[in-house]
Image (spheres, rainbow, N blue to C red):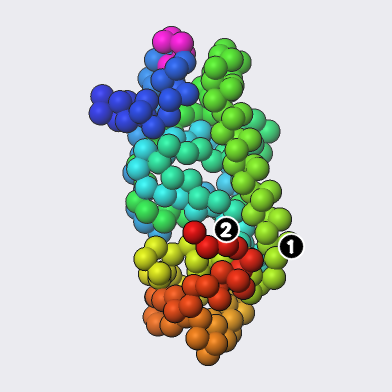
Amino acid sequence: MSTDKTELLLKLYPGIAELDEDVRSRLIACAKTVSVPTGAFAFHKGDPCTNFIFVLEGQVRVQLSSEGGREIILYRVQRGGTCALTTSCLIGKEGYPAESVIEEAVTAMMLPATDFRQALLDSEKFRQFVFQGFSKRLCAVVARMETVALKTIDERLAEQLLRGEGGSLSNITHQVLAAEIGTAREVVSRKLKRFESDGLIRASRGKVEILDREKLQALSGTTGP
């Protein structure tokens, strides 16, 4: 790995920088750097898990897909983050139960499974780094599933729309919105038309503009700033 990539790794992952020097040096020496373009799959359901991944640049979307084409986004991994499914599959020596798509071109450091497991055995600090990241991600997934299970589609869609910057969501498709809130694309299309007829939003291709934030917040069950 180049010096620049090593410095970036240690900056983005303080837990790695804090490892004992011999463990840190071995991890860096064993790792390789890869680049993956936008739109590519990082892994598919059933793929073997062979590397622990450190994301240096870009963003990855981890999602479940049904045979009928329905999708639900579990979480995203950005620079400085780790993937809970990868951690789980490496420890359990199992294949991936979901799939991952590159949303923004990724540069990542890949640590082979054998070296990952050895570092877990050798270093308490590395174990703490891995399991803290796993715990945080797992709690976020549970919270997301709770939202899908307990909130109505209207509430979930309104909440998702309110996450846009500057009063709008850009470069967003009905399919991605559906995956975000755990429903079908056709349902999202129908709900957006109703929101528009109620004067809450203005929808166009790839963009949703918020017209009445207060009413949308009331519908979502959230409070304003």
Q: What's the residue type where badge 1 is placed?
A: Leu
Q: Position of residue 95 (x, y in %)?
A: 63, 43
Circles 2 and 1: CB distance less than 8 Å?
no
- What residue lies at 70% left-to-right and 65% top-to-bottom? 151
- What residue lies at 40% left-to-right and 70% top-to-bottom? 168
- What residue lies at 44% left-to-right and 45% top-to-bottom? 78
Residue sticking out furthest to the right: 150
In the image, residue 54 above or below residue 203 = above
In the visual, does 10 lie left or right of 192? left
Q: Position of residue 213 (x, y in %)?
A: 49, 72
| The stretch drawn in magenta includes residue 216 | no
Pointer 1 residue: 150
In the image, residue 139 above or below residue 196 = above
Circle nearer the N terminus (2, 1): 2
Decide if residue 7 is in sight here: yes
In the visual, does 85 lie left or right of 22? right
Q: Position of residue 225 (x, y in %)?
A: 49, 59
Decide if residue 178 is in sight here: no
The residue nearer to you, when weighing 108 against 57, is 57
* Total residue callouts: 2
Pointer 2 residue: 73
The residue nearer to you, when weighing 98 against 135, is 135
The image quadrant of residue 11 is top left
Q: Secondary structure at mark 2?
A: strand
Q: Secondary structure at mark 1?
A: helix
- Which segment did they paint magenta? 20-24
Q: Position of residue 21 (x, y in %)?
A: 41, 10
Q: What's the residue type where badge 2 is placed?
A: Ile
- What residue lies at 26% left-to-right and 24% top-to-bottom? 3
